[in-house]
Amino acid sequence: QVHLVESGGGLVQSGGSLRLSCVASGLIFSVNTVSWYRQAPGAQRELVATLAPYGEITYVDSVKGRFTMSRDNAKNSVYLQMNNLHPSDTGMYHCNTPGLVAYNDWGPGTQVTVSS
């Protein structure tokens, strides 16, 4: 069974930084596409960044130049370094893979709150 556990969220002032982590069990990140998603209160879930197995990374326009996604194969973990955070970045952040998204299978997520 696959489990993804996110961590690293918190409360930060506008302009601050956070580093989110996601560790997997039952799944190898290095051979899977993995993405970070976020969902603000009352809004639909949004795809933030995607890391392909071969290393290509794509970002939603609103975070380009501020967020960096990375992967540590030895730790089977992915990260999202978030700099220059805006209040609009507030939300629950999840990592996930296409296979789990298809089954609406989500981990606990980690809350990011950016105060103005």
Image: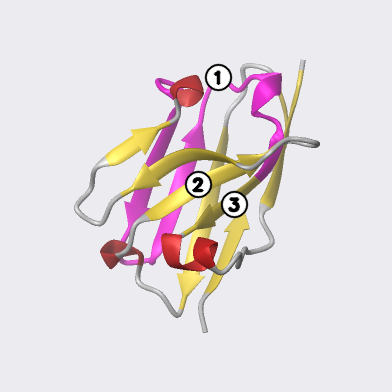
**Circle 3 is placed at which residue position?**
94
**Circle 2 is placed at which residue position?**
36
- Which structural element holds mark 1? loop
Q: Residue 89 location, x and y as percent?
A: 64, 28
Taking the image as shown, residue 63 lies to the left or right of residue 10, namely left
- Colouring rule applied to residues: secondary structure
Q: Bounds of the magenta span?
A: 64-92
Identify the residue shown where x is 62% and y is 17%. Answer: 15
Residue 72 marker:
none
Question: In the image, what residue type sits under mark 3?
Answer: His
**Circle 1 is placed at which residue position?**
84
Residue 116 belongs to magenta span: no
Question: In the image, what residue type sits under mark 2?
Answer: Trp
Q: Residue 54 location, x and y as percent?
A: 19, 53
Going from N to C along the chain, the mark reached first, 3 or 1, is: 1
Question: In the image, what residue type sits under mark 1?
Answer: Asn
Task: Determine the residue located farthest toward the bottom in the rendered image.
Answer: 1
